[in-house]
Image (tube, grey):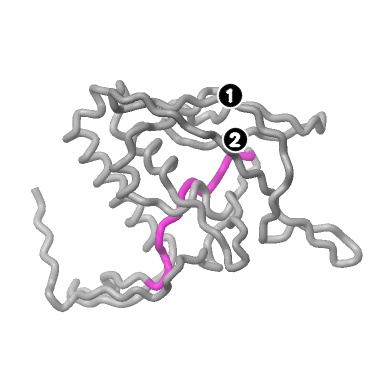
Amino acid sequence: KGQMHISDEVTSTIVYENYIMSDFSAWGVPSSLTIKPEITAPGGEIYSVNGMDPSGTAYYNNSGTSMAAPQVAGMAAVLAQYIREAGLEEATGLTARQLAQSLLMSTAIPMLDSTGSYYPVIQQGAGLGNVGAAIMADTYILMNEDATASYADGKVKAELGDDPEKTGKYAFSFTINNMEDVDKLYNLSADFFIQAPLNDGFDMYMYTATALIGALTTFT
């Protein structure tokens, strides 16, 4: 077992009241039309160890994937420990990895930009990870095979691919699994949005902002 020592001199500072997506964050989508990234974590101006200092005692503010990735790894580790200690692997028949990924993605908070519009899924994934909400969840979602190729890994996302016939119709399935002995009733709803179109007078582009679109959603 390792030990962690936190100095009294290490403090924290809240820079923003509301999180915003960093302008240097990488965007999807891969050519496979799968959803990447899958989740968001703080990665801008993080007070962290300065790895360039050989003493190992220096700290500085840094930004990038190297700051966000440890946040996700830490959330996953805490959640996996909780799952094992609570006996949820045995109760659900899932591995800690499968259940942790389901809980983290399904309880992530979709982030909004300064106009109140959703940041694109291809920029933020499921949203900002919230390990507290994941631990407090009393249900978990499992996607079925018609939703994503990674359904067996517990990832909560719908990767519907192309629509070559331009039907505008998509369908996928999922299950909401109750971890308590109390019946639960849910009101299901959905928001549909696209990359907002941008016309410069000559060509049409996909803008970085999103726009909600009207869609008929049926839950069966």
x and y percent of residue 163 in the render? 75, 33
Residue type for callout 2: Glu
Q: CA distance from mark 1 to mark 2?
A: 9 Å
Q: Is residue 206 left or right of residue 35?
A: right
The segment highlighted magenta reads 33-45
Is-magenta flag for residue 40?
yes
Taking the image as shown, residue 88 lies to the left or right of residue 177, namely left
The residue at 25%/27% (across/down) is 89
Percent x, y for residue 60? 30, 77
Up-down relation of residue 71 to residue 10 (above or below): above
Locate residue 184, reporting x and y percent.
Answer: 39, 28
Where disc 1 sits, the SS reads loop
Q: Is 55 placed left or right of 29 in the picture? A: left
Q: Residue at x 60, y 26 (%)?
A: 219
Q: Which residue is mark 1?
A: 146
**In the displayed structure, would residue 195 be above or below residue 171?**
below
